[in-house]
Amino acid sequence: AEVVIVENAAAAGALVADEIVRLIVGRPDAVLGLATGSTPLPVYEALHGRLAGTDVSQVRGFALDEYVGIDPKHPESYRSVIAREVVEPLGLNPDQIHVPNGAIEGIEHAGPDYEAAIEAAGGVDLQILGIGTDGHIGFNEPGSSFASRTRVKTLTSQTREDNARFFDSIDQVPMHCMTQGLGTILQARHLVLLAFGEGKAQAVADAVEGPLTAMLPGSAIQLHPHATVVVDEAAASKLK
Ligand code: F6R
């Protein structure tokens, strides 16, 4: 992967937002791969001003993941988060922005349906990725196959602790998620992984320089011909 070390998260947001604007200007129906969590927020914020005056009515998007069994109207469902942080502020067409279906009823169809929707869209042009402190991308926790497709995964206790900040208590963090697989993510045409802060330094080093192993899901990016890693100094601190 190409590693770009930037001053801070805002600079990373500006850099990645510029790339996304170029993509949309060149291809008004571009397909964006959207991440949730804290890391991509500076990108979405930077896009806000930059997309003013650009026709975004045809832009399409696919979120990486969703909690299983969460009420889609819950403010921390990824459906709600994507609506609030991305679709509404950027004025995207909500009908063209997809989030995996985390409803328990019919869950056996949710993965294949999502894969089919991504394929029908012609695949993802640019996939934004964060990385978990345990090395997950999407919610592909350690042990995820590099060939995996969208499916249910069990969140590690580390991930549930990390995400407890979005809920009233850790008991409210769902146990399971529906996530694009590593194989799904690897099919995006450009991967852009962002990470900020010392807490991500080991996960970043493992992803960029670690052995290719299912136990370090982020290492899957080494298989991708066009992966860009945008990090601040702290997140880069364990790179050799
Ligand atoms: C979110 C996702 C996760 C997060 C990761 C980091 O859609 O798939 O991989 O990117 O958990 O989360 P933050 O950015 O909150 O540290």
Image (tube, rainbow, N blue to C red):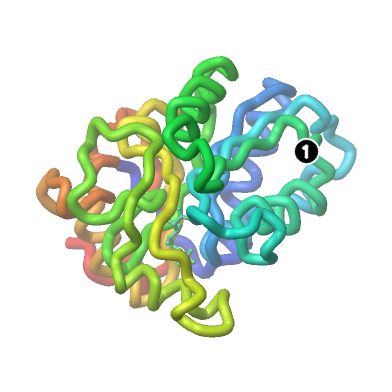
Residue at screen point 81% across, 50% down: 88
Q: Residue furthest right?
A: 53
* Relative horizontal placement of residue 148, taking residue 61 as reference (left or right): left
Compared across the picture, whether 81 is left or right of 213 comes to right
Q: Is residue 55 visible?
A: yes
The residue that appears at 28% across and 59% down in the rendered structure is: 135
Q: Is residue 79 left or right of residue 239?
A: right
Q: Position of residue 47 (x, y in %)?
A: 72, 50
Return the residue found at the far front: 105
The residue where tag 1 is placed is: 94
x and y percentages locating residue 105 in the rendered image: 53, 42
Query: The disc labelled 1 sits on which kind of residue?
Result: Pro
Q: Residue furthest bottom?
A: 169
Say above or below: 198 vs 134: below
Secondary structure found at label 1? helix
* Percent position of residue 56, x then y: 80, 33
- Considering depth in this image, is 54 or 68 the residue closer to the camera? 68
Ligand 1 shows up in the quarter that is bottom left
Is residue 12 in view? no
Q: Is residue 161 above or below residue 22?
A: below
Please tell me which residue is depicted at 52% across the width and 56% down the height of the picture.
69
Decide which of 206, 153 is in the foreground and name it: 153
For the N terminus, the image quarter is top left
| Spot occupied by residue 179 in the image (x, y as percentages of width and height) | 42, 45
Q: Quadrant of the C terminus?
A: bottom left
Q: Quadrant of residue 55?
A: top right
**The one of 152 and 85 positioned closer to us in this rendering:** 152
Counting other residues with Cα less than 10 Å from the Cα at mark 1, is it few (<14), some (14-19), or many (20 or more)? some
Residue drawn at x 29%, y 41% is 221
Q: Quadrant of residue 212?
A: top left
